[in-house]
Image: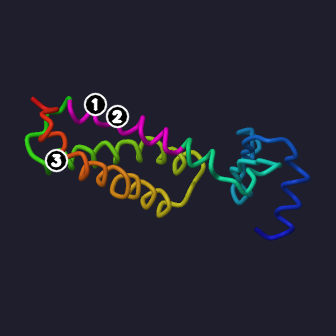
Amino acid sequence: MPAPVTAAIEHAAPVEGLYHLPFAEADRASGQLEAFVNVVPTGTGIGIGAQMAGGLIIGVISTFLALAIVRATRPATYWSAVGMFAFVGLTIGFVSHAYYWNWFQFPTTYIVVTIAEVMVGGWALVGAAFGAFIREKNLVP
């Protein structure tokens, strides 16, 4: 990040939090700068162990929740199970990222790629791993 931008954020947003400019609807005008920034003045440090552990816990819980959804659909084949996991990923990606496009004008390409990454890079791969397991372990009647 360029030094002047860093200095401006450090000066104007010394407290941790989310900042959205302009804040009030009355302050919005065509051609005016808009920004959406998450400020962490002290940083997160160089150790990412806690973040990795948290990510693992979130991933495991998410997988069990998705597994419950897919199990309820009773997929008949391996590929239908993979497809259901991919659909869960599409839903998660859309619900969690499309709002940023709508409300904060995130670039369309960023939103599309992010949703695709969640769907394919995340949940379709989980489906590929669990698809056979669902049928073999008789998790689906």
Q: Position of residue 75 (x, y in %)?
A: 13, 39
Q: Which mark is residue 132?
A: 3
Estimate how packed mark 1 is, as few (under 14), some (14 to 19) or many (20 or more) residues with alpha carbons within 10 Å.
few
* Discs 3/1, front: 3
Q: Which mark is residue 64?
A: 2
Q: Quick one: label 2, few (<14), some, or many (20+) residues within 10 Å?
A: few
Determine whether label 2 and label 1 are within 8 Å by CB. Answer: yes
Q: Which image quarter holds the N terminus? A: bottom right
Q: What's the distance in space between the residues labelled 2 and 1, CA to CA?
A: 6 Å
Verify whether residue 62 appears in magenta. yes
Quarter of the rendering occupied by the C terminus: top left
Query: Which residue shows up at 45% across the image and 57% down it?
Result: 114
Q: Residues within 10 Å of mark 3 (few under 14, many from 20)?
A: some
Residue type at mark 3: give it: Ala
State the image quarter where residue 34 is shown. bottom right
**Which amino acid type is marked by label 2?**
Phe
Is 133 part of what is drawn in magenta?
A: no
Q: Percent x, y for residue 85? A: 27, 45
Disc with the residue nearer the chain's start (3 vs 1): 1
Residue under label 1, please give it: 68
